[in-house]
Image (cartoon, rainbow, N blue to C red):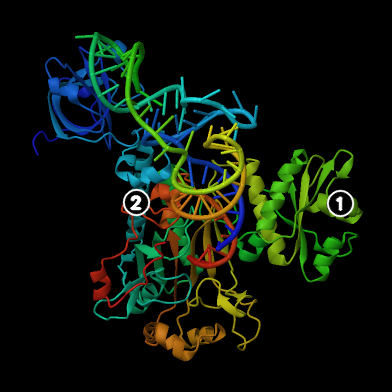
Amino acid sequence: MENQRTHTCGELRSDHAGERVVLNGWVDTIRDHGGVMFVELRDRYGFTQVIADPGQLPEAGELKPEWVIAVVGTVQLRPEENRNAEKPTGHIDLHAESLEVLNRSKVPPFEVEPDSTTREELRLEYRFIDMRRRPVLRAMEMRSDVARIIRREFFDLGFMDVETPILMKTSPEGARDFIVPSRLHMGQVYGLPQSPQLFKQTLMVCGVDRYFQICKCFRDEDLRADRQPEFTQLDMEMSFVCQDDVFKVIEQVMVAIYKEVLGYEVSAPFPRVTYGDAMTRWGIDKPDTRFGLEIFDLSDVASSSEFKVFRGAVESGGTVRGLVLPGGAELTRKQIDEAEAVAKDYGARGLAWLKLTDEGPAGGISKFLGEAEFAAIAERGGAKAGDLVVFGAGTWTTALTALGQVRLHFGKTRDLIDKSRHDLLWVTDFPLFQWNAEENRWQAMHHMFTAPRQELPEPGEDLSGITADLYDLVIDGSEIGSGSIRIHRPEEQARVFEHLGISEAEAADKFGWFLRALDYGAPPHGGIALGLDRIVMLLADSASLRDVIAFPKLASGVCPLTQSPSRPDASQWEELGLDVAAPDES
RNA sequence: GGGGCUGUGGCGCAAUUGGUUAGCGCACCAGACUGUCGAUCUGGGGGUUGCGAGUUCGAUUCUCGUCAGCCUCGCCA
């Protein structure tokens, strides 16, 4: 192109005064004073003020916001009184000698301002304008930085980047697969990977030894603020390792990311809590430890309580737990009702509560409780006058989960979370199996390739005591990644399949290729996968994954930019040997 | 599939117990202006209040349905 830039719009300083330069960029703001006009030129790197005299440069008067132009001119130091210390380029002007319009722009549907309040759907439909806004572009830069640091650290540690297929065999296990029909094999389909799990394990059998990949994964499930149908994982796997080796690598990478992107010092090794401890202390397997309010056990005193809800819960094999909200006695009835609604959302029948006043316990269920309960509340929960105490009674899971969510509710609504802090921790010792009550069967907590630590019992027996080197990385209360030490012996893999009710024939059909690989000298191995989008979302302090994805999908799964998904042409169906019932047009 | 919130010029918002011509800021268009920096000043154009029914003399406002967006439970690591 002619008039190619010699500098970017963020570059020129007083030192450049007197130089003849060319800038390319977008017209940001135009301040026309008749005899002189100021045009702020913008690109990814910043803004530079261009000064033009419309008498000598008539085309300057034609300019509109978002036009793309080239300006040839001389850099001049501004008169002292006109310097702008707020802007990096605020000490100079570019005095335009000539100006070329490289492209015009329609009037954009919204303005390119840093603090745009435009509704998100429209921003995403016009992402090419939205991303000209600094904060949006900044999130993308942050994401790029994270990817760069990851690659650098992994290469430094001797990892090999290997790409795995996007078109692969479908598997009905886990999340729903996206299906891609095959033209060459009519009636047959590929599935898009939910993760490269079996490929990376196969790479260990290949002898790759240390593998990593930043890869796209796909899951055809309902979306959430932190869930997109396609997302990016940092996937890694290592041979001849134990859990600690995996932790060490991830810790090194995460420390580097937090340090270089946020300037935040994370100390390694990260704290570790077992799944059981996380559940009993915080009522959740991904605790936000940036605030207190730990849950405590009241089952022993509750078992002899006058309060039949408490006694009943314990007698039927359940538990009673408590949570103290310091200063919570000031909560209104409405605020308590809101907390109760949270508990109910998560399966609790209700939320028992009481307030501690200078005159002693008051309100809620206080009149049903006795000295033993009050003593336990004060001793174990540290409750004092002015506090609110809430209780969860029921099964172990329900009582703790409900209280855990009420705890998070208080954390947010009472502003208890120290946002300046970043807590990275490992949750370990997950059970390998969980009971699926609806389908009346055991299923894998993580996935069925995780190695049990204990000898497996006979099929049909209770598996709840079986644990694994199965771990999650949790950051600020978000689950960022999950991994495990895998099964590497075929006979052990077969035994797990048996417990999960997967027949030999079924296993051979779905995973036969992988089982064959295990048969030929698979090394012990393990790894983890981290959600890259979620990491960037936390770093950017965003409420939505959409903020850190260039072209994200809406909650309905629709791409607002391209309007996908869309109906294919009839010929496309035909070529695939497919047809679809016409959608209800009425 | 369930629950909640939202929908008014291009964008962001307002409109009293249901009331007469739906208002404001920004943007847009035209004009003025030699030092602005989210310039300023003057004037102007632009709306089937998401859509459809209903209640009413009268609906942006009330009811029902529907569509869309967001959050969420289920689902999903």
* Dot 2: chain letter: A
Under mark 2, the amino acid is Phe
In this rendering, position of residue A349 left or right of residue A519: right
* Front in this rendered view, residue A11 or A177: A177
**Of labels 1 and 2, the one closer to you:** 2
**Residue name at image x 91 percent, y 54 percent:** A370
Q: Residue A533 at x, y = what percent?
A: 42, 54
Q: Residue A203 at x, y = what percent?
A: 34, 75
Q: Quadrant of residue A49?
A: top left
- Please tell me whether residue B31 is drawn above or below residue A50 in the rendered image: above
| Quarter of the picture holding the N terminus of chain A | top left
**Residue name at image x 36 percent, y 77 percent:** A169
**Residue name at image x 52 percent, y 77 percent:** A451
Under mark 1, the amino acid is Phe
* Front in this rendered view, residue B39 or B16: B16
Residue A551: image tag: 2
| Quarter of the picture holding the C terminus of chain A | bottom left
Q: Residue A27 at x, y = what percent?
A: 24, 30
Q: Is residue A508 visible?
A: yes
* Dot 1: chain letter: A
